[in-house]
Amino acid sequence: QQQVKQSPQSLIVQKGGISIINCAYENTAFDYFPWYQQFPGKGPALLIAIRPDVSEKKEGRFTISFNKSAKQFSLHIMDSQPGDSATYFCAAIPAGTASKLTFGTGTRLQVTL
Amino acid sequence: DSGVTQTPKHLITATGQRVTLRCSPRSGDLSVYWYQQSLDQGLQFLIQYYNGEERAKGNILERFSAQQFPDLHSELNLSSLELGDSALYFCASSSQGLAYNEQFFGPGTRLTVL
């Protein structure tokens, strides 16, 4: 059972374009929503994260939009660059003292020149 | 470089064997996590330790076990290996192990079971 659904599976965007990746969740106990970026041969690295009490968070070219009622959140990469080519994972963590990251299935982004 | 180290980088073994993966967390981090990444299952949380104690358990098979030692390094033991255990195994660490603490991932150990 996939608790966090992510789409699309792959994405090709031209340099300077906007990349959009979407995620949806079912478990209302989820309380923290990070996005991870993974380059080939490397471990995932935290990109940006949001709590459900805000609807949007922006850090540089990266923005998370969060819709609590729809249980959906998305990552927008503005002015996409070839260096952004990587696999992106959305994730969710329930509130509490444990920290069980539940990942989406990943989106492979390719930014072309 | 995240500051999390994992050894070995690659491991090739046969079905039925047992292996141990090692992880050293970032300096000062008290919590260690183990994840498995495979093509069919994606990235899955296995287990979390905080200061030597198990804190959370995910989809970890009974053939797998882990522990965190007093110096805070951790080991993941995989036994009676099957072909399906071939995957990338990541260790991550965080300061307090709470939900909002950033998890820093190591470079992973690639396990191949033949």
Image (cartoon, coloured by chain):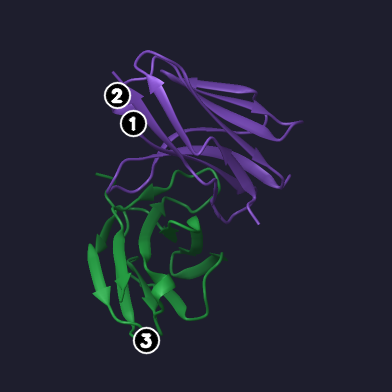
> Does label 1 lie on the same chain as label 2?
yes
Which three-letter amino acid code belongs to the residue tagged 3? Answer: Gly
Give the crowd class for mark 1: few <14, some 14-19, many >=20 residues within 10 Å: many
Q: Which residue is mark 3?
A: B16
Mark 1 element type = loop
Q: Is residue A59 left or right of residue A32?
A: left
Discs 1, 3 touching: Cβ within 8 Å: no
The answer to whether the residue labelled 2 contacts the one labelled 1, judged by CB atoms less than 8 Å apart, is yes
**Amino acid type of the residue that numbered disc 2 sits on in the rendered structure:** Pro
Residue A11 in the image: state x and y as whole percent.
45, 30
Q: Is residue B55 left or right of residue A77?
A: right
Give x and y (percent) for residue B102: 45, 43
Q: Is residue B18 left or right of residue A95?
A: left
Q: Residues within 10 Å of mark 2 (few under 14, many from 20)?
A: some
Rendered position, B68 above or below A81: below
The colour assigned to chain A within the rendered structure: purple
**Residue lying at 67% horizontally and 33% vertically, measured from the top left:** A72
Label ID, residue A110: none
Q: Which residue is mark 2?
A: A82
Q: Give the chain ID for the green colour.
A: B
- Camera sees residue B8: no
SS for tag 2? Answer: helix
Residue sitting at the far right: A69
Three-letter amino acid code at the position of disc 1: Ser
What residue is shown at x 39% (from left), y 55% (from top)?
Answer: B92
Chain bearing tag 3 is B
Residues at circles 3 and 2 in contact by the CB criterion of under 8 Å: no
Q: Which residue is mark 1?
A: A85
Report the quarter where the C terminus of chain A lies.
top left
The 10 Å Cα crowd at callout 3, few under 14, some 14 to 19, many 20 or more, is few
Image quadrant where residue A60 sits: top left
